[in-house]
Image: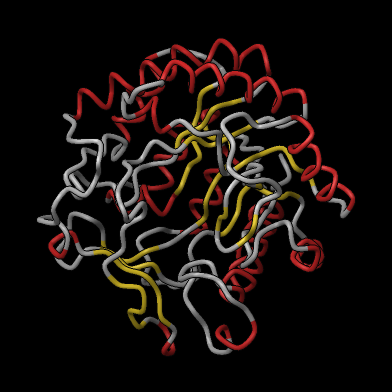
Amino acid sequence: MSKMRFAVHLPGGHLLPENRRLMVQMGCTDVIGNGPRGVLYGAPRATPMTEVWDYADIMLDKAQVERDGLRFEVLEDAPNAEKIFWNLPDKEEQLENFCTSLKNLGDAGIKVIKVQHMPPVRLMIPRTYHDKPTRGGATSTAFDYDDIKNAPATSKYGTYTEEEVWENIEYFLKGTLPTAEKAGVVVTFHPDDPPISPIQGFPRPLRSVEAFDRLLEIVPSENIGLNFCQGCFAEMGVDVPAAIRHFGKKIFFAHFRNIIGSVKEPGGFQEIFHDDPAGRVDMFEAMKAYYEIGFEGPMRPDHAPRMEFDDRISGGVPGYLLLGKVFAMGYLKGLAESVEKMGY
C-alpha cells in the first residue's frame, strides 16, 4: 500500500521560512509550489512575471524547500498560456516559450505542473459569498449561479463558443505534450471552478467527468492528467469516490475538500469544514478510493472556513487562511492513517 504524501497552502506561500517550518511540524512531506513569477495568495514570487521560466529561478525555490526536508516536484502553476488558450496574437511565440519552460522545469526535477485555462475575466474563481456562516459561527465561501448567470462579459478579448475553446485546448496539447514527454513533466488540468457555463459570457468546458474524458483523449499521452479537485467534482454533483476510481492513474495530485449543495441545486453550494458530516462527500470513502487506485500524491486540504482568531494571527484570502488549513491537515492525516491501518 502506498504511503500518502501531504502538502498545504498557507497564507504567504512556501517562500516564507516560517511556513515551511510549520509544514514540517504538521507532518507534510511535500510543497505543492508555484512558479517563479507574480503573486499568489499574497506571496511575492522570486522574480517578476516572465514568459520563460528560467532554470536558475526554479532551482532557487527548489533548494529552499528541500533544505527544510520537503519535496518540491509539483507546481500548482504553469508558465503563461493565456494567448494560446484564447487564440490571441503571438500565441505561436508563447507556445515556444512554454515549451522552453517545460524543458527547464524537467531539468530542475519538477515532475507535474497545473495549467490554467480559465477565461480572462475579473473573477477567476467566482464566489458569490465570502463570509457565509457555517459551523460554530465560522464563515466560508459559497456560490449561487442565480446571482451571477446574467453578469455581462468583461473580457477585452471578445466572445467564444465552447467548441472554439476546445480547439484552443487541442492546439495547446498538440504543441506542448511532445516537449513535456521529452522533459518528463506531466501537464495537468483543474476543473473549471465553479463547473458551470457560461460565467461572465465565457464557456467553461471542463465541468464534468465526460469533459475530462474528452480532454484526455485529444492527445493520448502518459504526460497529461488531472489535478483532481474533489471539491469541484462535488460541485458538479457527481459521486466523488467513483470519479477517483474512474480517473485512477490519471490523477497526479489532489485537492481534498468538502461542500454542501452543488452548482445545479437551488442555492448553489458552500464550502464547509472538511470533517462536517453534512458534506456531500464521504471523506473516508474518498480516501479509500485514493488508496485503491494506488495514488502516489501529493494531496493537500483545499478551501477551508475562516475560524476564530484567524484575523489576528494571519493574513490571506477567504479559503486560504491559517487555522482551517491546520485543522484540515490533522483530519486528513487521521483519515489516511485509518485507511492504511485497516488495510483498504
Position of 229 compared to 25: left or right? Answer: left
At horizontal 62% and vertical 59% (from top left) the residue drawn is 9
Residue 97 percent coordinates (x, y): 56, 22
- Residue 181, placed above or below residue 318: above
Residue 213 percent coordinates (x, y): 35, 25
- Residue 190, placed above or below residue 222: below
Residue 140, image quadrant? bottom left
- Residue 83, placed above or below residue 301: above
The type of colouring in the image is: secondary structure
Residue 262, image quadrant? bottom left
Query: Toward the viewer: 200 or 209?
Result: 200
Q: Quadrant of the N terminus?
A: top right
Residue located farthest toward the left when viewing the structure as drawn: 150
Residue located farthest toward the right when viewing the structure as drawn: 67
Residue 204 percent coordinates (x, y): 26, 39
Position of 61 compared to 47: left or right? Answer: right
Query: Toward the viewer: 317 or 51?
Result: 51
- Residue 303, placed above or below residue 215: below
Disc tally is 0
At horizontal 69% and vertical 47% (from top left) the residue drawn is 4
Position of 190 compared to 204: left or right? Answer: right
Residue 109 percent coordinates (x, y): 77, 29
